[in-house]
Amino acid sequence: MPSRTTSSPRVAVLADSDTRWKWGALTAYRIQSDIRLDGYLLRGRATPTVRQLDEVGARADSLREIRGVDFVRSVDRTRYDVVVLACVGGAVQAMLHGLARAWDPQTSAAAAAGARRPVVVTGYVGVVYEKLADGLLLRHGADVVLANSRHDADRFREVYRGVGADDGSVVECALPFLGGDRYTGEGDPYTVVFAAQPSVPESRADRTYLLRRAVEHARKHPDREVLIKLRSKPGEHTTHIEELPYQKLAAKSPGPLPANCRLVYGNMGEVLDRTDLMVTVSSTAALESLHRGIPTAVLTDLGIRESLGNHHFLGSGCLASWDELDAGHRPEPDREWLARAGVASMGVPPALKAGGGGYEKAFDAARARVTELREAEHLPAIAPYYTPRTAPGYLPGILARHGLDPQGEPLPGYADAPEETGGLRRVARETVREAARGAYRHGVQRVAPAIRRWGQL
């Protein structure tokens, strides 16, 4: 990603949750390391807290919380080389329309004068197991749509071709946060990690069951350490809403946890450093674990279902139940599946590795594409598939949620609102937001489930 000047390329990353910030920032550094990275956290339900940002560990030269309409203004003023949109599909679509309007020569003096717009990159933070067409079409219009595996790249292109949209933006790469030391053998003590997920499974009964089985595994194997790796602390939100946190389920379970079973937080990479067996329903942590060569089990106890996401691991050799794990089973992954899934495990022969050259080569294509676009004499206008003509009953609502009208202009009330400056909000503002989050969390975790139960009577 060479710059036209002697200064480092300037990159903006917009993210709307802790995991998407991790993906966006690390993707930017994978494309090129010597950049100036300005981070923007989209204000909303899942805006990460300071603790979550520290746990993720992805660094930035500047970091601030922002509204979508103000992000468009900031990008228009700053003249970035690359913009990475690490958000849910609807937010990506809104930003694409807002940026397209901001860089329209008919409405932008800078664009009319020949100023170049930045290259726009987007993608997915992990396994794509639901809303494939919906999410992809909402991301259409970006210059580069990253696919984390060969399997995903083929599916992405098929969706775009299926609606007659250009599929040239799809570029195969890998998840940017794979890494760490290769697993060398059983540690002391032997450590089993259950990677919890905020919304999979969803029901109280299923989540209580998984917690109980992890605890029972600890009791059956007192020589093992069982860690239940949690995504967030009570009051925090992640990419998905967690209505029933495992912390609360554990607090209501009969009796204390065994001495060799603990709830833990922290950076997943650091947890994997001491893991001998990774257990999950469908967490992206399974891919991180497989990349290191750690024995990894994807649970079948609740069935193999699209709603759980574990169907993604069909053919992986990793599907197993708690009963099998209790009996000492250690899954052996299928090497060809690893290669197709973009997991360039250090134990996979080079001929089968992603891109033919292993993980270190997985970002070559993305790096080359971004470089090509940055050095091009002219970048075409951003042209999303969804427009007021192709989706008149869908697009306006998506844009309005982010303060934009169907033409990508700020809605009345958004355009004139003062833009907040500086870094993350001061303590007083943080306190106000945490109080609001508490009220929202109560509604999500208490009121909404009760209303659903009443509706089933």
Image: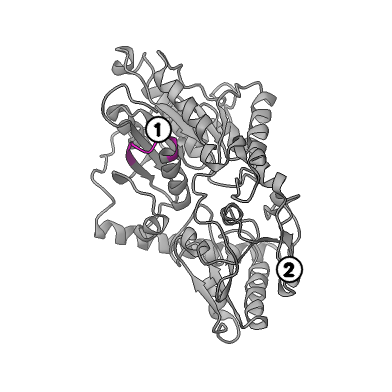
Which x, y percent locates residue 166? Answer: 60, 21
Is residue 33 shown in magenta?
A: yes
The residue that disc 1 covers is 83
The correct choice, above or below, for 150 with respect to 102 in the image is below
Q: In this view, does 377 lie to the left or right of 124?
A: left
Farthest bottom residue in view: 255
Give 415 or 423, whichever is nearer the viewer: 423
The residue that disc 2 covers is 329
Q: In which quarter of the image is the C terminus?
A: bottom right
Q: Give amino acid for label 2.
A: His
Which x, y percent locates residue 7? Answer: 26, 29
The correct choice, above or below, for 222 with respect to 239 in the image is below
Q: Residues within 10 Å of mark 1 (few under 14, many from 20)?
A: many
State the SS at label 2: loop
Give 428 or 338, whichever is nearer the viewer: 338
Q: Residues within 10 Å of mark 2 (few under 14, many from 20)?
A: some
Is residue 444 shown in magenta?
A: no
Q: Choose top left, top right, bottom left or bottom right for residue 136.
A: top right
Q: Which residue is drawn at 41% across and 14% down?
A: 378
The correct choice, above or below, for 42 with respect to 240 in the image is above
Determine which of the numbered discs, if any, sits on residue 200 in the image. none
State the SS at label 1: strand
Whole-angstrom CA distance, mark 1 to mark 2, is 45 Å
Q: Which segment is the magenta one?
A: 30-38
Q: Give amino acid for label 1.
A: Val
Q: Residue at x 74, y 55 (%)?
A: 317
Q: Which of marks 1 and 2 is nearer the N terminus?
A: 1
Which x, y percent locates residue 399? Answer: 47, 34
Res 414 visible: no
The correct choice, above or below, for 341 with respect to 111 in the image is below
